[in-house]
Image: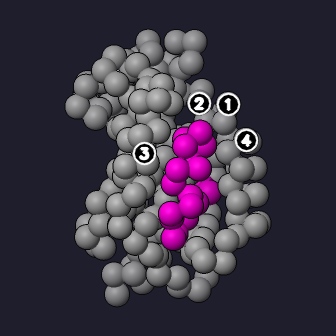
């Protein structure tokens, strides 16, 4: 894989558990660019999702900045992110790996009662037994997400950099080159 340097407006996408936030944090520290998790601006206390009228202005405000890293898979707001993004990173890891990470992270968050985005905690009931249980999310969206990203990468905008990583080792090797 040839080395490509990212720009200053970076969108990071991948299934839950792929490491979007971890990569965003590392890039933010190295490039001195602020990062935003879409989950952080979408979810309100007690896991109440934002309406588009609440969510879209927040996303647009971040995307209007001169530099940013936005991580998340909210296809409903890509029209606010992609036009100003100069780099799109797709963490396209094996399903079994992302699912294992998602389950492990969910267990850890439930047991430790981690507060997410300053206001919500995951519970075993919500994560495993609710109608829209988090642990089944990857099963529901995997095929659709993969097709959307495949289409995006098949028809690239020549003014943007597209980085497609298929394994965490590829991503880590790229980060090492970037830091070197």
Residue at 64% from the left image edge and 52% from the top image edge? 94
Q: Which residues are magenta?
A: 74-93
The circle drawn on residue 156 is none
Q: Nearer the viewer, mark 1 or mark 4?
A: 4
Seen from the viewer's position, the closer of residues 63 and 7 is 63
- Residue 31 x, y percent position in the rendering: 30, 73
Residue occupying the point 66% across, 78% down: 158
52 is higher (above) or lower (below) than 151? above
Q: Which image quadrant is residue 8 in?
A: bottom left
The answer to whether marks 2 and 1 mark residues whose Cβ atoms lie closer than 8 Å is yes
**Which one is in front in this view, the residue at disc 3 or the one at disc 1?**
3
Query: How many residues crowd mark 1 within 10 Å: few (<14), some (14–19), many (20+)?
Result: few
Q: Which residue is mark 4?
A: 144
Residue underneath mark 2: 137
Height in image: 151 above or below 124? Answer: below
What residue is pinned by disc 3?
59
């Amino acid at each position: 894989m040839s080395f490509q340097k990212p720009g200053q407006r970076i969108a990071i996408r991948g299934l839950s558990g792929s490491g979007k936030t971890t990569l965003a944090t590392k890039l933010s520290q190295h490039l001195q660019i602020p990062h935003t998790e879409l989950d952080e601006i979408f979810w309100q206390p007690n896991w109440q999702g934002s309406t588009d009228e609440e969510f879209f202005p927040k996303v647009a405000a971040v995307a209007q900045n001169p530099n940013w890293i936005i991580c998340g898979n909210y296809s409903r707001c890509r029209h606010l992110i992609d036009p100003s993004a100069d780099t799109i990173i797709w963490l396209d890891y094996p399903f079994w790996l992302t699912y294992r990470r998602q389950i492990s992270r969910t267990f850890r968050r439930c047991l430790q009662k981690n507060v997410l985005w300053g206001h919500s905690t995951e519970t075993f009931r919500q994560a495993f037994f609710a109608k829209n249980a988090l642990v089944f999310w990857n099963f529901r969206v995997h095929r659709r997400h993969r097709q959307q990203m495949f289409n995006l990468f098949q028809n690239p905008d020549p003014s943007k950099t597209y980085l497609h990583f298929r394994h965490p080792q590829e991503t880590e090797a790229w980060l090492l080159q970037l830091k070197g």
